[in-house]
Image: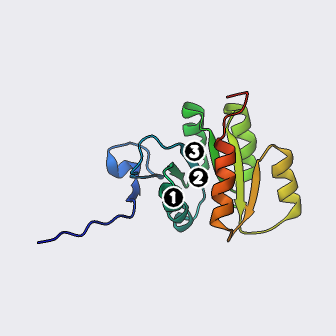
Amino acid sequence: MTRLLNREPEMRLKSDIGQSEPGVFSAALPDPNGAVVCLLDDDSSVLKAQGRLLSSVGWKPELFADPGKFLSYAEAHQPRVVVLDVWMPLMNGLEVQSRLGAISPLTKVIIFTGKDDEKVRATAMDAGACAFFVKPFCDEEFIAAIRRALEPTSAD
């Protein structure tokens, strides 16, 4: 009997795989040497979709729905790249960006949002974001921005 395997990365709460942080998502990945890219969005469907996209190019997505849990992770792990949603109920992405700058100053930030607002864009970019996307956006451009953010700099 032939058994069909699901090739799509499995998305589950870290608490479901023996870790103690409910609300933090992680994807099972085919490439253990891929770069970690953190995603923070309060919308679980966006997290899952973007997590699959990042997995498809060999990166390890760390997915967060809670800004506080993400900031704790960032302080402990100093991620190279994070993608932040702007409009979240617990803490907006611009505040997360500001706090992240204090605890992990070398982390590169990419902002994505569902509302195109020039003031928000200007604030994010002035605070050091390396890219800004309005949902829905082109996957290829998004991947290219993450690749650029992952490139080593003299500070790395």
* Image quadrant where one finds the N terminus: bottom left
Asked which quadrant contains residue 74, the reply is top right
Residue drawn at (53%, 56%) of the image: 54
Residue 61 visible = yes
How far, Cα to Cα, is label 1 from label 2? 8 Å
Mark 3, mark 1: which one is toward the viewer?
A: 1
Along the line of sight, the residue nearer the viewer: 90 or 117? 117
The residue carrying mark 3 is 70
Q: Is residue 71 above or below residue 29?
A: above
The residue sitting at 39% across, 57% down in the picture is 12
Q: Residue at x 69, y 61 (%)?
A: 141
- Front: mark 3 or 2: 2
Residue picked out by circle 2: 39
Q: Whole-percent x and y of residue 145? A: 69, 53
Mark 3 or mark 1, earlier in chain: 1
Determine which of the numbered discs, if any, sits on residue 144 in the image: none
Q: Are marks 1 and 2 in contact (CB under 8 Å)?
A: yes
Quadrant assignment, res 98 = top right
- Under circle 1, the secondary element is helix
Question: Residue most toward the left?
Answer: 1
- Where is mark 1, residue-wise? 51
Residue 16 on image: x %, y %: 34, 52
Mark 1 or mark 2, which is nearer to you?
Answer: 1
Mark 3 and mark 1 residues within 8 Å of each other at the beta carbon: no
Q: Could you tell me which quadrant the C terminus lies in?
A: top right
Q: Callout 3: few (<14), some (14-19), or many (20+) C-alpha neighbours within 10 Å?
A: many
Q: Residues within 10 Å of mark 1 (few under 14, many from 20)?
A: many
Q: Give me the residue at 63% from left, 47% from top.
A: 82
Residue 2 point in image, percent of width and height: 16, 71
| Residue type at tag 1 | Gly
